[in-house]
Image (spheres, rainbow, N blue to C red):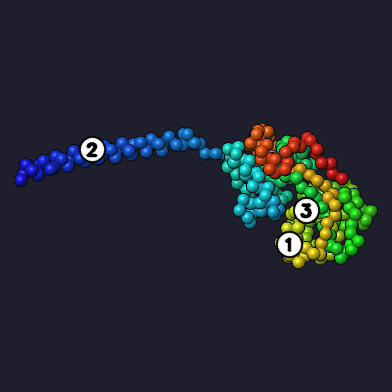
Amino acid sequence: MGKRQTGVARWLVMLLQIVWGTVWGISGAVAQEGNAGPERSQPKPEVLFAVGEWPPMITENVPGFGIHTERVTEAFVAMGYRVRYIFLPWRRAYELTARGEYAATFSWIWTPERSAEIIYPDHPVARAYQKGFYKKSRFPDGLEIDRIADLDPLGLRPVGVASYWYEVEFRRHGIEADIVTSSEAAWRFLDAGRADIFFEEEQVGWQDMKRILGEEAVANYTTTQPVQSDDMFILFSRNHPMGPALRDAFDRFLDTPNGQSMCRRWGVCKKSGENQSVPN
């Protein structure tokens, strides 16, 4: 009885040694795999973009954060970055980027004033068609406008949003305007009859109108001809440590076959030095 127990015990010990050796070997391989992982795959650098609400192009309320935001994400992920979007009032988004608290902001058209404060890339991410929205009942014969300068002889008073492209144009042409802090305020100002016209990117304008004033408002409004057609850009900070390098990396990427494929889908495969829009 005792000898048989000893034999069984020895057999169990040998079996345990075999099993333990196998488990130890597997565990060692997993540990080596885990240790090797971080060395092979370093965390991707993160880029913080300061942006504002501009649906459907940029908005916190949909997956992907809007049409323009999806393009920026697509490009920078392909370049090897992680992206994060900080939603702020537009003026603050621009000012904090210019100051260097954020690496970049989008989407902005080219102006001489901005180009002195911030870095423009060669490649745009979109093209905007700016039109004037007005009430049919206020101007039943329509408005023949295809440039900002046309407002003055017609005696029209516009409403606009602070920091938008037309502020400079209003000043340049001596046009008095009511400037408010948001597109929602501008639409309500216009709808109340306190202004004659509001300029906005066409697709954005119709969507904002429906969202703010309701679907039924669409029948009450119409638009002018485009007063301006502009490339829209990511603006990179001169004062952020990553700003200049990110601009260069973005332009290099958009010059690659992969980048060119993207910008063809976006419909904006051209450089800022070519066909640069000149404000009217």
Binning the other alpha carbons within 10 Å of mark 2 as few (below 14), some (14 to 19) or many (20 upward) gives: few
Q: In the depicted view, which residue is nearer to us: 110 or 141?
A: 141
- What amino acid does circle 1 point to? Lys
What residue sits right under mark 3 in the picture?
202
Element under label 1?
helix
Q: Is residue 86 visible?
A: yes
Q: Is residue 243 visible?
A: no
- What amino acid does circle 3 point to? Glu
Query: Which residue of the protein is positioned furthest toward the right in this rendering?
Result: 153
Lateral position of residue 179 relative to residue 74, left or right: right
**Residue at left offset 18%, top offset 38%:** 14
> At which x and y percent is residue 64?
62, 50
Q: Quadrant of the C terminus?
A: top right
Q: Quadrant of residue 104?
A: top right
**Residue at left offset 63%, top offset 36%:** 258
Q: In the depicted view, which residue is nearer to us: 28 or 269?
A: 269
Lateral position of residue 238 relative to residue 43, left or right: right
What residue sits right under mark 2 in the picture?
18
Structural distance between the alpha carbons of marks 2 and 1: 73 Å
Lateral position of residue 82 relative to residue 268, left or right: left
Element under label 2?
helix
> At which x and y percent is residue 152?
92, 53
Residue 59 vertical placement versus 47 (above, below)? below
**Residue at left offset 88%, top offset 54%:** 176
What residue sits right under mark 1 in the picture?
210
Structural distance between the alpha carbons of marks 3 and 2: 74 Å
> At which x and y percent is residue 250?
66, 36
Element under label 3?
helix
**Residue at left offset 6%, top offset 44%:** 2
Q: Quadrant of the N terminus?
A: top left
